[in-house]
Image (tube, grey):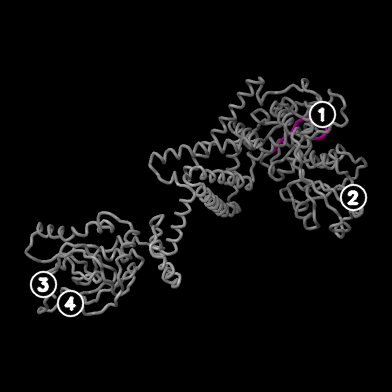
Amino acid sequence: MWVKLCCLLLYFLALFVLARVFEAVAWYESGFLATQLVDPVALSFRKLRTILECRGLGHSGLPEKKDVRELVEKSGDLMEGELYSALKEEEASESVSSTNFSGEMHFYELVEDTKDGIWLVQVVANDRSPLVGKVHWEKMVKKVSRFGIRTGTFNCSSDPRYCRRRGWLKSTLIMSVPQTSTSKGKVMLKEYSGRKIEVEHIFKWITAHAASRIKTIYNSEHLKGEWNKSDQYRVKIYLFANLDQPPAFFSALSVKFTGRVEFIFVNVENWDNKSYMAEIGIYKTPSYILRTPEGIYRYGNNTGEFISLRAMDSFLRSLQPEVNDLFVLSLVLVNLMAWMDLFITQGATIKRFVVLISTLGTYNSLLIISWLPVLGFLQLPYLDSFYEYSLKLFRYSNTTTLASWVRADWMFYSSHPALFLSTYLGHGLLIDYFEKKRRRNNNTDEVNANNLEWLSSLWDWYTSYLFHPIASFQHFPFDSDWDEDPDLFLERLAFPDLWLHPLIPTDYIKNLPMWRFKCLGVHSDEEMLETFQDSESDSDSENKEVFSSEKEVSEDDELNTFHRRGEGEPRCGAETCSCANKYCHHEPYERKARSYGSYSTAGDMEPDWSAWPSEMLHCTECVVCLENFANGCLLVGLPCGHVFHQNCIVMWLAGGRHCCPVCRWASYKKKQPYTHPQPLSNDTPS
């Protein structure tokens, strides 16, 4: 996860550097930067009209270029970046979709239940033609969609009872606007009553109703009282301009940020005394002033702060975000990080996509699960101060120059998705190249694996998971015995209980008591060591396959060896086990086909019981292999008290039989320790 996070941060750094390179190239070729101001006098009439349409100002009654230029100057300073974006948006001939309502519930769900947006709906009465023709309606949809206004068509033939109840007996236009200035407030529907059915007149009607929600100030006394007023709004944005009404983008933003930011329009058209404006630091108009508890911020002085809906929306979202904004941001970042697995994972192509799907599912599930307690945590009433401090931190950090660069880059790459995807792909290919080179230097075989090899190994692992559940958790892939004898596969299917046992970890085997078997005699330590080495020389290669006190071994190899050498499971009797003090009498549970040493205890040599754990039964024979304990051999005891050769019992347990070969007590469960009876004085060792 940390590797993918570092790769994603490197990608964002590369995007930031690439944006600066593009700015330098644009400056070298054209001689201007995106933040450079444009003189409206030098622009053509078509470009001036395009700027007014993007800002949402009507120009139908202004035939002269001079009047259009003055209206552009009154609405705000024009930058090269805004002009470039407006011209590109006009050239793009993208069709904007409009909703067709199927009935009352559909209309209520989208229009009347939407508290933070504006809807324009054309109602078509029964057996009537629409109020706005198809061509004009398409122009209207494209025009209002620039400001986040959604459109739709309601045909009364689909639900005539609802139209009669609403009083829609003739074709008309309906506009939905939030009624109050609080978040998630009531919605009011307004019907168009104008006589002229033209795009400009309808748009002017829409902007007039949207602007009526904005608080308007007409004199300095009113401004002074509003400026010093402290109310529920922590963030306020003022527009000081010489206009009849605020631009449409300003009104649309006031609806979008209802309950979070208060929008105030200061009309300075007929002001004689502007001394108070100078006192609060407003020296020119038009000006967009953001007032927060931390101070005053002049919008438009930094990179990417254009007089447009998209730029100001990005700016206000960074200052006063909703929980949904943070969730969407985290969702995008998590998925970008998860897609890095496609390039970090090496090997077959199918393997890459399987790992990618698994990572996407895991990361998104964890993200949703992580957000649930956060949402519940934010609902607590005594966290208001924490929430305020968090917003204060957002405001401090997002009014810096670096934050303005990040917002400008975000708008640039989001308007050029092909560039964003191509740079992401190029960054991923670089990661893939360096990761492949690193693994080749480490001699990793999976780099050269093809799809068939990986699918084959996946199938081997899957079959081993079904039929060898214990061993399949240890190694991957697993060399299955079914390749040698397919009849075993049919046997297992005939008796499914043989392989539907619970999965038990084998880590407890390392913790079982282990010691060496010693005899009391006249032999020296050197002779005993030599005898022990001779006794184990024949089985040295096999002992490498089982773990000892110095190192662990592969459980899969032990399991295969154990299966090949097993000859049956005779029942346990009670009279054939040779024990030193007649404390243990058992018949072998499973016979062994190979020898683990030829040395055995002589009849005149008594075992050294002091070296044995107190809870173990005293005996001199392993009931698994039917051989006596040799002097110096390794012994392992189970919780039930029975003792066996270390090699024998490890292969028994690693084969999935987690019980004692003698008494069937679970080998991983504790048992009450066995208390040895005091031997009689005339007992002789057997």
Q: Give yes or no for contact between labels 1 and 2 (Cβ–Cβ under 8 Å).
A: no
What is the three-letter code of the residue carrying label 4? Lys
**Sequence order check, earlier mark of 2 and 4:** 2
**What residue is pinned by disc 1?**
269
**What residue is pinned by disc 2?**
171
Q: Is residue 396 visible?
A: no
Q: Is residue 112 visible?
A: yes
**Sequence order check, earlier mark of 1 and 2:** 2
Q: Position of residue 272 (x, y in %)?
A: 81, 26
**Sequence order check, earlier mark of 3 and 4:** 4
**Residue at the image point whose x is 44% and y is 73% from the top:** 495
**Residue at the image point whose x is 26% and y is 65% from the top:** 648
Q: Give yes or no for contact between labels 1 and 4 (Cβ–Cβ under 8 Å).
A: no
Indicate which label's residue lies in the foreground, 3 or 1: 3
What is the three-letter code of the residue carrying label 1? Glu
Instruction: Write the start and end of the magenta stretch as one range.
Output: 236-245
**Residue 238 on the magenta segment:** yes
Quadrant where the image shows the C terminus: bottom left
Indicate which label's residue lies in the foreground, 1 or 2: 2
**Residue 298 on the magenta segment:** no
Tell whether 578 sits left or right of 660. left
What is the three-letter code of the residue carrying label 2? Ser
